[in-house]
Amino acid sequence: MAKKKDGVFVYSENLKTIPQVIEWAEKQDVERFSRFFVEQPNIPLYCFSSGGASSTLHYAALLYETNRGMAKALTGLSISSISDDALKSSKILIFSKSGNGVDTKNLVDRAIAINPKGVGGLSRDNGKDNYLIETLKKVTTNWFQYKIPTLKGGFISSTSNIAAMCLVYEAFTGDFDIASKLKVDVSPNNSFSYIKKVGDKIDINRLSVKKNYIALYSGWGEPSARDFECKMVESGIASVQLCDFRNFCHGRFIFMSNHLEDSVFVLFLTPREREFTRNLIFNGTTFDRKDELFPQTTEIITLKTEHDSPLATIDLVIKESVLVAEIGKVVGIDPYSPPNPYGIDKRVAIHEKYTDIMKQPLKNYVIQGRNGDVKSVSRKKAINYDPKKSIEKLAKDNGVSEATIRGYIKEHRIDRLTDEKMLMYNRIWLRFIKDSDQSIASIAKKLKMSENTVKQYLTRNYPQFDAVDGKITTVTENETLVKLREQLDAAPRRFERVKKIQERHPEYDLDTILEKLPLSKKEDNVYQVRCFMQMDVFDADIKKGHFRYKNGKIIYIVNR
């Protein structure tokens, strides 16, 4: 078992870095991730991961569903049970810590073969080739790689899921102020309580005899409950049964009745579940005799959060991580390096290929329905669709009729009109940033468009084109434009001084700040931005500056 010299478990010691991990997350640029994750919520989202990363994907799916969308968190193998048509008409998010596992490679290979523009990946930067990210780079800009500051080498991660959840939270909400709202305290007394039903505190050492943990959750508590189950089982500490509060009432209480002495409730509570648990578990009585529903000796661990928002999940994950650490100390198991009495070699299991399963999706069985035979999805060769081509050209290149192409567009709910707008936006802005001093007439002439069209699109600093409800778009913002926008948009979130400036001057938007940049055009752009962000003062009397584009870079001109 891996202990430090002073006897402190490594896993427990690592939890002290949670505030630093959250501080790191607050400085990350998640703009691209946010656009993929949040925009067009009418498109279903499949979230894939393996092992301990699954709780983050359940969190992402839960967030997505609060935004009018439908999402599903799945394992790497689950993709083999999903039809091509379902994948084509959905967004696919793959989360992998290393980006190089067998699961991840199988996932991304099939996903990009079916729906290359609809795939997104979130992965750690491990300082080496990342198969997930390198593969996605060839077909899309929907990849997101972060150098998460967590300790490597442990069997159970102590903080990486917290870091990833913070990124997902920021991408969804746009809120980068997490630490001050959570007020992280990793002491056991602040993280959980361990009592009998009557309210008497119990010595935590009694958990050494507990073999079953009944984890009950709802809503924002679900991802944290799943994270708890994964850590406890993968550490070999004890068995954990997951169940939402309502489903527990439909028969699962029988297990507790038969194993009360070696079992304990673990309640994941946000404000909305407290009355239910108080009425059922603490004050519940039998229907006829009005006896106590659960004996007074019932042992209960409670994890509470005051938040009734997406922050509740992160708060509960931090607290259940402390709980796992404390249970580990009691039973003598450090989750960072758990014992493996029979020497089962993880390397064999995790690298075992399952290509045969992936290559043989569920067979085309004929299912007898009420109205006759219902056949599964056709496995015809996919149309090679290119939104830049006309229907006539697509038909000719694919060797099919124009009616077939129109049928393909209708079947896949492709919003061709919005795609055309996005293509035009990319063409006009790419021409503009080559030299923003060129005239509107010059741009229009080179692109063979009207001057009014060019003016219309250049007034859109951000490509906000609303797709027709129920349809999807296949064209994204050009990568050069994305990078340029990231350079402009990311600065206020990466530098504490700018946050303070904007607090003092709420009337200043990003454009106002950029106009006041007193910088030399001879210096490197990124260096100039960094210098500006470190300035001691920022006031309205700073001489007005200006910027323009040149070959895809920002050129600053002073006192123009």
Image (cartoon, grey):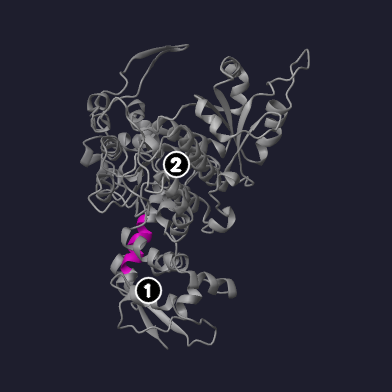
Q: What type of secondary structure mainly makes up the magenta span?
A: helix
Q: Nearer the viewer, residue 6 or 307?
A: 6
**Residue 297 coordinates in the image, percent (x, y):** 66, 24
Residue drawn 31% across the image and 81% down it: 523
Disc 2 residue crowd, few under 14, some 14–19, many 20+, Cα 10 Å: many
Q: Is residue 312 left or right of residue 420?
A: right
SS class of the residue under badge 1?
helix
How far across and how far down the image is residue 164, in percent? 43, 48
Boundaries of the magenta span: 423-431
Look at the image and tell me in which quarter the C terminus lies.
Answer: bottom left
Q: Amino acid at mark 1?
A: Ile
Quadrant in the rendering for residue 103 = top left
Quadrant of the rendered image containing residue 109 = top left
Q: CA distance from mark 1 to mark 2?
A: 47 Å
What residue occupies the far front of the structure in this picture?
6
Specify the amino acid type for callout 2. Thr
Taking the spot 57% from the left edge, 27% from the top edge, the residue there is: 264
Q: Which residue is mark 1?
A: 440
Total label count? 2
Of pointers 1 and 2, the one earlier in the residue sequence: 2
What residue lies at 49% left-to-right and 72% top-to-bottom? 498
Residue receiving disc 2: 56
Nearer to us in this view, 94 or 12: 12
Note whether 315 is above or below 332 in the view shown: below
Q: Magenta stretch: residue 426 in it?
A: yes
